Every structure is written in structure tokens, then in C-alpha cells.
Amino acid sequence: MTDELEGTLAEEIRLSGYAGDRIQAYLARPGRALGDGPFGGVVVIHHMPGYDAATKRITREFAAHGYLALMPNLHWRDAPGADPGDAAAAARAAGGVPDERLVGDVEGAVTHLRGLDASNGRVGVIGYCSGGRQAFLAACSLNLDAAVDCYGAFVVGSPPAGLPLKVRPLVGLAGSLSCPLLGLFGADDTHPSPVETAQLERELARRGKVFEFHTFEGAGHGFLATDRPSYRPEAAAEGWARIWDFFGRHLI
């Protein structure tokens, strides 16, 4: 289909993910007005609510800005063909997406993007909420060119008692970070809290990694989500400006 965003082209595809599984994914390409490329690539990691319309629109937004963008459906195996909300509920009940599976699925997405004729070979990753944690995990596990963590919970610290998520802290992987990292956080967030992001910042600095963190006053978790009460327009506008600048420096 042709989207309203600058003539971007978007389609659902299948790609080879973890263990060779063929999973659903959403691919968006720049429209003809932006030429034939080559273009940098962005793997978009959706939030816990899943492979939804809001994150598909974000994927198309990257295409409108001149990137090949691909969002794998991380919940595909939990409920194939189900509504994104139902699939997300099934994934949450199972404890969340296993880290090993996540890395395999993102690796498949990176391989797919780099194999496209219009690719310049450079690929970054961005994730929101649980996807922010997963973006950090991917950047510490794979050879990437840039990574953006948007308020990723439990990179530092573990889920509180009572949450079904079975995830572990990732701060110990900081030494394996393969690329520059941009972090966008809210000062009013609790997962991650400013104390946790400061701890991650210290560890990355100790390891000599290239990174930049920005914490927005008056913003909490999900401040980029236009379809949620947590949306904060001013913080979101500055956050997106940071994202475009960051990817522009590392993927083009």
C-alpha cells in the first residue's frame, strides 16, 4: 500500500528470525520523492502492547525521513494471526519475549535490511518501553551502527514482585555495546527511574562507550506515545529531533 506519509511504501512480509522461524514483519520504504537510495536501515522494536497501528505508523515515519524501516512482530509465535492486543497478552502471560529469541529476531531483521538493494549497509535499532530494553540488548549482542533506547525498563534493576515479566537486568552487558547509543528518558518515570539511568550512564562511561542520554522534565513513561495520556508534546518534539540528528550522523 501507499501511505499518506510522503508516498512511503509499506507492506507486511515474512522474515527469517530466531531458529529460522518465519515470522511476520512490517516493512516501510522511502517514496520515490526521496530517490533510489542508498538508505540507512532502522529496525523498529515495538512496545509491550505489540505489533500495533501506532508502531506501524512510527515505522512509516522513518521511511518518510529516508530510512528503510522494518518492525518484526515479536509476539508472532505467542498467538499467530491474533489481534495485537491478544498476542501481547499471551506474550505477557508467558513472561515476555525471551532474550535469546529477541536477539535472533532482530538479527533476522538486520540481515533482511542489509540485503535490500536500496540499503547502504548501515542499520540501527530503536525501541520503546520493553522495546527500549530490547534495543539495548540487541546493541550489546549484534553488530549494529546505532541504537536508541526510549525509556527502556529493567536495563538496570529487575521487575517488581507481582509482574509476570521474566527478564533480567542488562547493565552487565554494557561492555559489549557495539555502537553509539542514544537514551531518551522521563524525569517522572519509575521504570526506568532517573537513579537507574544514572547508574547505566556511569557504567557506559566507565566502559568508554559512545552514548548520549537526555532526561525530560515533566515527562514520564511513554511520553513519545501520541495515542496515550502519557504523551508530552514538547518532550516528544525534542526527543524526535534528537533521534533524527542521531540517526542522521550514524546511518546516512
Image (tube, rainbow, N blue to C red):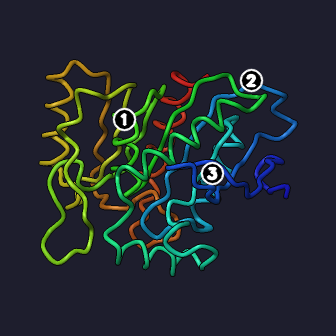
Q: Are marks 3 and 2 in contact (CB under 8 Å)?
A: no
Please provide percent x and percent y for residue 88: 46, 73
How far apart are the alpha carbons under marks 3 and 2? 18 Å
In the image, what residue type sits under mark 2? Pro
Q: Residue at x 81, y 32 (%)?
A: 34
Q: Residue at x 31, y 39 (%)?
A: 214
Q: Nearer the viewer, mark 2 or mark 1?
A: 1
Residue 59 is labelled as 3
How far apart are the alpha carbons under marks 2 and 1? 26 Å
In the image, what residue type sits under mark 1? Ser
Q: Nearer the viewer, mark 3 or mark 1?
A: 1
Q: Say which residue label 2 marks.
A: 38
The quadrant in which residue 189 appears is: bottom left
Residue 84 is labelled as none
* In the depicted structure, whether residue 140 falls above or below residue 73: above
Q: Dot 3, how many residues are within 10 Å of its Cα: few (below 14), some (14-19), or many (20+)?
A: many
Residue furthest to the front in view is 19
How far apart are the alpha carbons under marks 3 and 1? 23 Å
The quadrant in which residue 219 appears is: bottom left
